[in-house]
Amino acid sequence: MPLKLVRVDDRLIHGQVVAVWLRAVGADRILVVDDAVAADPFLSDVLRLAAPPDVPVEVHGLAGGAARARELAASPEAAFVLLRSPVSALRLREAGVRFDVLNLGGLGAGPGRHPLHRSIHASDEELAALRRLEALGTRVELRLVADERPVPLRSVDRAGGPAPDVPDATR
Amino acid sequence: MRPFRILLVGHGKLPAALLASAELIAGPIEDISAISLHAHETPDHLAAAVADAAGRDRRPVLVLTDLQGGTPHNVATALGLRDPRLACVSGVNLAMLLEAALGLDRLDGEALARLVEVGRAAIWASSWRAASTAPMADGAEAAAPRRRPDRPDLARRAS
Protein backbone atom coordinates (compact mmCIF):
# COMPACT_ATOMS: atom_id res chain seq x y z
CA MET A 1 0.00 0.00 0.00
CA PRO A 2 1.15 3.60 -0.39
CA LEU A 3 3.75 4.58 2.19
CA LYS A 4 1.96 5.45 5.42
CA LEU A 5 4.21 8.34 6.32
CA VAL A 6 7.49 9.81 5.16
CA ARG A 7 9.06 11.76 8.01
CA VAL A 8 12.27 13.75 8.40
CA ASP A 9 13.55 13.55 11.97
CA ASP A 10 17.25 13.78 12.75
CA ARG A 11 16.80 11.55 15.80
CA LEU A 12 15.07 8.93 13.60
CA ILE A 13 13.40 6.51 16.02
CA HIS A 14 12.60 8.10 19.40
CA GLY A 15 9.77 8.60 21.88
CA GLN A 16 7.45 10.67 19.67
CA VAL A 17 7.85 8.17 16.87
CA VAL A 18 7.25 4.95 18.83
CA ALA A 19 4.63 6.31 21.22
CA VAL A 20 2.62 8.45 18.83
CA TRP A 21 3.34 8.14 15.13
CA LEU A 22 3.48 4.36 14.69
CA ARG A 23 0.07 4.10 16.30
CA ALA A 24 -1.37 7.13 14.54
CA VAL A 25 -0.43 5.98 11.07
CA GLY A 26 -0.90 2.25 11.66
CA ALA A 27 2.46 1.25 10.23
CA ASP A 28 3.86 -2.24 10.74
CA ARG A 29 7.38 -1.71 9.39
CA ILE A 30 9.95 1.09 9.69
CA LEU A 31 12.26 1.88 6.81
CA VAL A 32 15.22 4.08 7.77
CA VAL A 33 16.95 5.52 4.72
CA ASP A 34 20.29 7.22 5.35
CA ASP A 35 23.73 6.55 3.91
CA ALA A 36 25.62 7.33 7.13
CA VAL A 37 23.39 5.18 9.34
CA ALA A 38 23.41 2.30 6.86
CA ALA A 39 27.23 2.36 6.88
CA ASP A 40 27.34 2.17 10.70
CA PRO A 41 26.29 -1.26 12.03
CA PHE A 42 26.39 0.06 15.60
CA LEU A 43 23.87 2.85 14.92
CA SER A 44 21.73 0.42 12.92
CA ASP A 45 21.63 -1.90 15.96
CA VAL A 46 20.57 0.92 18.26
CA LEU A 47 17.70 1.75 15.89
CA ARG A 48 16.56 -1.87 15.72
CA LEU A 49 16.50 -1.99 19.53
CA ALA A 50 14.52 1.27 19.64
CA ALA A 51 11.45 -0.01 17.82
CA PRO A 52 8.73 -2.06 19.48
CA PRO A 53 9.57 -5.79 19.24
CA ASP A 54 6.79 -6.48 16.73
CA VAL A 55 7.82 -3.70 14.34
CA PRO A 56 10.72 -4.67 12.07
CA VAL A 57 13.26 -1.96 11.27
CA GLU A 58 15.16 -1.94 7.98
CA VAL A 59 18.13 0.38 7.46
CA HIS A 60 19.16 1.20 3.91
CA GLY A 61 21.39 3.66 2.10
CA LEU A 62 19.73 6.02 -0.36
CA ALA A 63 20.05 3.81 -3.44
CA GLY A 64 18.84 0.62 -1.76
CA GLY A 65 16.26 2.56 0.25
CA ALA A 66 14.62 4.07 -2.83
CA ALA A 67 14.23 0.63 -4.40
CA ARG A 68 12.92 -0.86 -1.16
CA ALA A 69 10.45 2.02 -0.62
CA ARG A 70 9.03 1.55 -4.13
CA GLU A 71 8.73 -2.19 -3.46
CA LEU A 72 6.98 -1.66 -0.10
CA ALA A 73 4.61 0.91 -1.61
CA ALA A 74 3.50 -1.80 -4.06
CA SER A 75 3.17 -4.48 -1.35
CA PRO A 76 0.36 -5.04 1.20
CA GLU A 77 2.65 -3.81 3.99
CA ALA A 78 2.12 -0.48 5.76
CA ALA A 79 5.56 1.13 5.88
CA PHE A 80 6.76 4.22 7.71
CA VAL A 81 9.83 5.87 6.16
CA LEU A 82 12.24 7.81 8.38
CA LEU A 83 14.94 10.12 7.03
CA ARG A 84 17.46 12.42 8.69
CA SER A 85 17.43 15.17 6.09
CA PRO A 86 15.06 16.81 3.61
CA VAL A 87 17.78 16.31 1.02
CA SER A 88 17.29 12.53 1.36
CA ALA A 89 13.55 13.06 0.84
CA LEU A 90 14.23 14.88 -2.42
CA ARG A 91 16.61 12.12 -3.55
CA LEU A 92 13.93 9.50 -2.87
CA ARG A 93 11.34 11.53 -4.76
CA GLU A 94 13.71 11.94 -7.68
CA ALA A 95 14.35 8.18 -7.62
CA GLY A 96 10.66 7.57 -8.24
CA VAL A 97 9.35 7.05 -4.70
CA ARG A 98 5.80 8.46 -4.56
CA PHE A 99 4.64 10.36 -1.49
CA ASP A 100 2.07 13.15 -1.39
CA VAL A 101 3.08 14.52 2.00
CA LEU A 102 6.46 14.96 3.67
CA ASN A 103 6.30 15.34 7.44
CA LEU A 104 9.04 17.42 9.08
CA GLY A 105 9.26 16.34 12.69
CA GLY A 106 12.63 17.33 14.09
CA LEU A 107 15.68 19.02 12.67
CA GLY A 108 18.23 20.44 15.07
CA ALA A 109 19.54 23.97 15.35
CA GLY A 110 23.09 24.91 14.41
CA PRO A 111 25.23 27.49 12.64
CA GLY A 112 23.61 28.52 9.36
CA ARG A 113 20.35 26.75 10.18
CA HIS A 114 17.13 28.79 10.05
CA PRO A 115 14.46 28.16 12.70
CA LEU A 116 11.21 27.20 10.97
CA HIS A 117 8.81 26.00 13.64
CA ARG A 118 9.43 24.79 17.20
CA SER A 119 12.34 22.31 17.09
CA ILE A 120 12.52 22.31 13.28
CA HIS A 121 15.43 24.09 11.61
CA ALA A 122 16.79 23.92 8.08
CA SER A 123 19.95 24.87 6.22
CA ASP A 124 19.82 26.71 2.89
CA GLU A 125 20.42 23.41 1.09
CA GLU A 126 17.61 21.72 3.00
CA LEU A 127 15.22 24.62 2.34
CA ALA A 128 16.02 24.40 -1.36
CA ALA A 129 15.27 20.66 -1.27
CA LEU A 130 11.94 21.31 0.47
CA ARG A 131 10.94 23.96 -2.08
CA ARG A 132 11.88 21.58 -4.88
CA LEU A 133 9.74 18.83 -3.33
CA GLU A 134 6.76 21.19 -3.20
CA ALA A 135 7.37 22.09 -6.85
CA LEU A 136 7.25 18.34 -7.62
CA GLY A 137 3.84 18.11 -5.95
CA THR A 138 4.77 16.84 -2.48
CA ARG A 139 3.13 18.87 0.27
CA VAL A 140 5.61 19.65 3.07
CA GLU A 141 4.06 19.88 6.54
CA LEU A 142 5.77 20.71 9.84
CA ARG A 143 4.35 18.65 12.66
CA LEU A 144 6.07 17.10 15.69
CA VAL A 145 3.28 14.85 16.95
CA ALA A 146 0.15 13.52 15.26
CA ASP A 147 -2.48 15.52 17.15
CA GLU A 148 -0.90 18.89 16.30
CA ARG A 149 -2.25 20.98 13.49
CA PRO A 150 0.16 20.60 10.56
CA VAL A 151 1.95 23.81 9.63
CA PRO A 152 2.44 24.14 5.86
CA LEU A 153 5.96 24.93 4.70
CA ARG A 154 4.85 28.03 2.81
CA SER A 155 3.54 29.65 6.00
CA VAL A 156 7.04 29.64 7.50
CA ASP A 157 8.96 30.09 4.25
CA ARG A 158 7.36 33.19 2.74
CA ALA A 159 8.50 34.17 -0.75
CA GLY A 160 11.12 31.48 -0.58
CA GLY A 161 13.46 33.86 1.22
CA PRO A 162 15.33 33.23 4.44
CA ALA A 163 12.88 31.72 6.90
CA PRO A 164 11.51 34.08 9.54
CA ASP A 165 11.82 33.26 13.22
CA VAL A 166 8.42 31.90 14.17
CA PRO A 167 7.39 32.53 17.77
CA ASP A 168 6.39 29.39 19.55
CA ALA A 169 2.90 29.88 20.95
CA THR A 170 2.30 26.26 21.78
CA ARG A 171 4.79 25.77 24.62
CA MET B 1 25.93 -2.72 49.76
CA ARG B 2 24.32 -3.44 46.39
CA PRO B 3 27.09 -4.44 43.99
CA PHE B 4 25.81 -2.23 41.18
CA ARG B 5 24.68 1.37 40.63
CA ILE B 6 21.21 2.27 39.43
CA LEU B 7 20.50 5.10 36.98
CA LEU B 8 16.94 6.18 36.30
CA VAL B 9 16.82 7.84 32.90
CA GLY B 10 13.71 9.27 31.30
CA HIS B 11 11.68 12.15 29.94
CA GLY B 12 11.05 15.34 31.94
CA LYS B 13 10.34 15.06 35.66
CA LEU B 14 9.63 11.35 35.67
CA PRO B 15 13.03 10.01 36.85
CA ALA B 16 13.29 12.29 39.90
CA ALA B 17 9.60 11.83 40.74
CA LEU B 18 9.86 8.04 40.44
CA LEU B 19 12.89 8.04 42.73
CA ALA B 20 11.10 10.26 45.28
CA SER B 21 8.08 7.96 45.24
CA ALA B 22 10.25 4.85 45.65
CA GLU B 23 11.97 6.45 48.65
CA LEU B 24 8.57 7.30 50.11
CA ILE B 25 7.86 3.57 50.12
CA ALA B 26 11.29 2.13 50.85
CA GLY B 27 13.17 4.88 52.64
CA PRO B 28 16.43 6.36 51.35
CA ILE B 29 17.95 4.40 48.45
CA GLU B 30 21.72 4.49 48.03
CA ASP B 31 23.77 4.51 44.90
CA ILE B 32 21.04 5.71 42.59
CA SER B 33 20.78 8.74 40.27
CA ALA B 34 17.87 10.24 38.37
CA ILE B 35 18.75 11.76 34.99
CA SER B 36 16.28 13.61 32.78
CA LEU B 37 15.97 14.57 29.15
CA HIS B 38 14.33 17.98 29.10
CA ALA B 39 12.74 19.69 26.11
CA HIS B 40 15.41 21.23 23.85
CA GLU B 41 18.22 19.15 25.29
CA THR B 42 20.11 17.11 22.75
CA PRO B 43 20.79 13.37 22.98
CA ASP B 44 24.49 14.32 23.35
CA HIS B 45 23.79 16.24 26.58
CA LEU B 46 21.97 13.26 27.96
CA ALA B 47 24.67 10.79 26.88
CA ALA B 48 27.28 12.88 28.70
CA ALA B 49 25.15 12.99 31.85
CA VAL B 50 24.52 9.24 31.79
CA ALA B 51 28.18 8.43 31.13
CA ASP B 52 29.16 10.74 33.97
CA ALA B 53 26.71 9.16 36.42
CA ALA B 54 27.79 5.66 35.36
CA GLY B 55 31.17 6.43 36.90
CA ARG B 56 34.65 5.52 35.77
CA ASP B 57 35.25 2.51 38.02
CA ARG B 58 34.39 -1.10 37.20
CA ARG B 59 31.09 -1.39 39.05
CA PRO B 60 28.19 -2.61 36.93
CA VAL B 61 25.41 -0.10 36.24
CA LEU B 62 21.73 -0.86 35.84
CA VAL B 63 20.02 1.74 33.66
CA LEU B 64 16.25 1.80 34.00
CA THR B 65 14.53 3.88 31.29
CA ASP B 66 10.95 5.03 30.93
CA LEU B 67 10.11 4.17 27.32
CA GLN B 68 11.52 1.69 24.86
CA GLY B 69 12.59 3.60 21.76
CA GLY B 70 12.52 6.93 23.57
CA THR B 71 15.67 9.05 23.37
CA PRO B 72 16.68 8.25 26.99
CA HIS B 73 16.51 4.54 26.22
CA ASN B 74 18.23 4.89 22.86
CA VAL B 75 21.07 6.88 24.44
CA ALA B 76 21.48 4.34 27.24
CA THR B 77 21.31 1.41 24.81
CA ALA B 78 23.99 3.01 22.64
CA LEU B 79 26.25 3.52 25.69
CA GLY B 80 25.53 -0.05 26.80
CA LEU B 81 26.56 -1.50 23.44
CA ARG B 82 29.95 0.19 23.86
CA ASP B 83 30.38 -0.35 27.61
CA PRO B 84 29.47 -3.86 28.85
CA ARG B 85 29.20 -2.59 32.46
CA LEU B 86 25.85 -1.03 31.54
CA ALA B 87 22.65 -3.08 31.42
CA CYS B 88 19.48 -1.32 30.22
CA VAL B 89 15.86 -2.17 30.90
CA SER B 90 13.00 -0.05 29.55
CA GLY B 91 9.51 0.55 30.90
CA VAL B 92 10.53 1.13 34.51
CA ASN B 93 7.70 1.28 37.02
CA LEU B 94 7.70 1.49 40.82
CA ALA B 95 7.54 -2.27 41.24
CA MET B 96 10.54 -2.81 38.98
CA LEU B 97 12.50 -0.04 40.64
CA LEU B 98 11.84 -1.39 44.14
CA GLU B 99 12.89 -4.87 43.02
CA ALA B 100 16.09 -3.45 41.52
CA ALA B 101 16.90 -1.38 44.60
CA LEU B 102 16.00 -3.91 47.29
CA GLY B 103 15.71 -7.35 45.72
CA LEU B 104 18.75 -7.92 43.53
CA ASP B 105 22.18 -8.88 44.85
CA ARG B 106 23.86 -9.09 41.46
CA LEU B 107 23.42 -7.90 37.90
CA ASP B 108 23.40 -10.74 35.37
CA GLY B 109 21.05 -12.06 32.69
CA GLU B 110 18.93 -13.84 35.25
CA ALA B 111 18.58 -10.66 37.30
CA LEU B 112 17.53 -8.67 34.23
CA ALA B 113 14.95 -11.30 33.27
CA ARG B 114 13.60 -11.10 36.81
CA LEU B 115 13.28 -7.31 36.58
CA VAL B 116 11.33 -7.60 33.34
CA GLU B 117 9.05 -10.20 34.92
CA VAL B 118 8.45 -8.16 38.09
CA GLY B 119 7.75 -4.99 36.11
CA ARG B 120 5.33 -6.79 33.84
CA ALA B 121 3.62 -8.69 36.66
CA ALA B 122 2.88 -5.36 38.35
CA ILE B 123 0.63 -4.36 35.46
CA TRP B 124 -2.79 -5.70 36.18
CA ALA B 125 -6.34 -4.55 35.49
CA SER B 126 -8.29 -5.00 38.71
CA SER B 127 -11.52 -4.70 36.75
CA TRP B 128 -11.09 -7.98 34.89
CA ARG B 129 -13.16 -9.82 37.50
CA ALA B 130 -16.07 -7.40 37.03
CA ALA B 131 -15.67 -7.46 33.27
CA SER B 132 -15.80 -11.26 33.20
CA THR B 133 -19.42 -11.23 34.44
CA ALA B 134 -20.60 -9.29 31.40
CA PRO B 135 -19.83 -10.02 27.78
CA MET B 136 -17.19 -7.65 26.47
CA ALA B 137 -18.21 -5.31 23.70
CA ASP B 138 -16.14 -7.04 21.08
CA GLY B 139 -17.14 -10.51 22.26
CA ALA B 140 -13.57 -11.31 23.32
CA GLU B 141 -12.93 -13.67 26.21
CA ALA B 142 -12.78 -11.53 29.33
CA ALA B 143 -9.95 -13.61 30.73
CA ALA B 144 -7.85 -13.27 27.60
CA PRO B 145 -5.65 -10.44 28.94
CA ARG B 146 -4.42 -12.71 31.73
CA ARG B 147 -2.28 -14.52 29.26
CA ARG B 148 1.32 -13.41 29.42
CA PRO B 149 2.69 -14.32 26.03
CA ASP B 150 6.24 -15.53 25.96
CA ARG B 151 8.54 -12.84 24.72
CA PRO B 152 11.67 -14.59 23.41
CA ASP B 153 12.91 -11.24 22.18
CA LEU B 154 13.11 -9.99 25.78
CA ALA B 155 14.79 -13.12 27.01
CA ARG B 156 17.36 -12.68 24.28
CA ARG B 157 17.99 -9.06 25.18
CA ALA B 158 18.28 -9.84 28.86
CA SER B 159 20.91 -12.53 28.38
Image: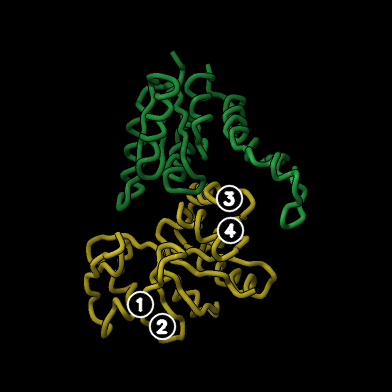
Chain colours: A yellow, B green
Q: CA distance from mark 3 to mark 4?
A: 13 Å
Subunit that carries the residue with mark 3:
A
- Label 4, on which residue? A58
Give x and y (percent) for residue A108. Answer: 32, 60
Report which residue position mark 1 lands on. A153
Which residue is more in the foreground, A14 or A112? A14
Q: CA distance from mark 2 to mark 4?
A: 27 Å
Question: What separation in Å lies between label 3 and label 1 (alpha carbons)?
Answer: 31 Å
Quarter of the rendering occupied by the N terminus of chain A: bottom right
In this rendering, which labeled residue sits more in front, label 4 or label 1?
1
State the CA–CA distance, disc 2 to disc 3: 33 Å
Q: Which residue is at 74% across, 46% downward?
A: B142
- Residue position marked by numbered label 3 in the rendering: A52
- Tell me which label, 3 or 1, sits earlier in the chain: 3
The location of residue B159, given as percent across then percent down, is 61, 31
**Direction from residue B95 to residue A71 in the image, left or right:** right
Have a look at marks 3 and 1 and say if they share a chain: yes
Judged by depth in the image, the label closer to the viewer, 2 or 4, is 2
